[in-house]
Amino acid sequence: MAANAILRRNKTSIVDTLCADYTLILNKADQNELITQREYKNLKSINQKDKEGHVVELLDKIMDKGEKTCLAFLNVLQTDEEIQKTYPELNNILKKENCPLPYPVQACSVDNTVKDAGVVKCSEPGSRNTAGPSAGGTAQYTMVDGG
């Protein structure tokens, strides 16, 4: 399912949830480079908007950036410990969608990477294009953008 569609379909619930601490989600979007420094400064300095208005602007900005950014945003929402503690309701919203993590979450080595256009692959020492680690191996998962 398209990440953009998941965000659009659940926009009201996500906005309501993220309003609890809208500066945290803005800072996390900046920290994870989902928005540019200019966008961060513009979103941070919005006047005449309430908390909801700030979150709506951020979510719209992320959705306008396309599928890759939406996937990255969903990944942050599902894997960042501080976000999980601050917004525990997000799990219920995303579980309802059967929203899988866009990137595998697993301890990885930093020396093996397999790139194949737009696919998450696993590589381990001594193997070629495996689907997962064998017993005792350390896997490297990488999301590639097709380039």
Image (spheres, grey):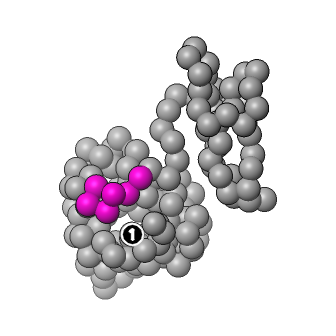
In this view, which residue lies farthest toward the bottom? 48
Q: Quadrant of residue 8?
A: bottom left
The amino acid on which the numbered mark 1 sits, given as a three-letter code, is: Ile
Q: Quadrant of residue 6?
A: bottom left
Q: Residue at x 57, y 57 (%)?
A: 33
Q: Is residue 47 magenta?
A: no
- Residue 8 sits above or below residue 112 on the image: below
Q: Position of residue 64 (x, y in %)?
A: 53, 78
Q: Residue at x 68, y 26 (%)?
A: 124
Along the line of sight, the residue nearer the viewer: 64 or 57: 64
109 vs 3, left or right, is right
Q: Position of residue 133 (x, y in %)?
A: 59, 26
Along the line of sight, the residue nearer the viewer: 48 or 107: 107
Residues packed near mark 1 inside 10 Å, few (<14), some (14 to 19) or many (20 plus): some
Q: Which quadrant is home to the C terminus?
A: bottom right
Q: Residue at x 45, y 66 (%)?
A: 1
Is residue 27 visible to us here? no
SS assignment for the magenta stretch, majority:
loop
Along the line of sight, the residue nearer the viewer: 45 or 135: 135
Is residue 99 visible to us here? yes
- Residue 46 sits above or below residue 145 on the image: below
> Where does label 1 land, which residue?
6
- Residue 96 sits above or below residue 143 on the image: below
The magenta region covers 95-100
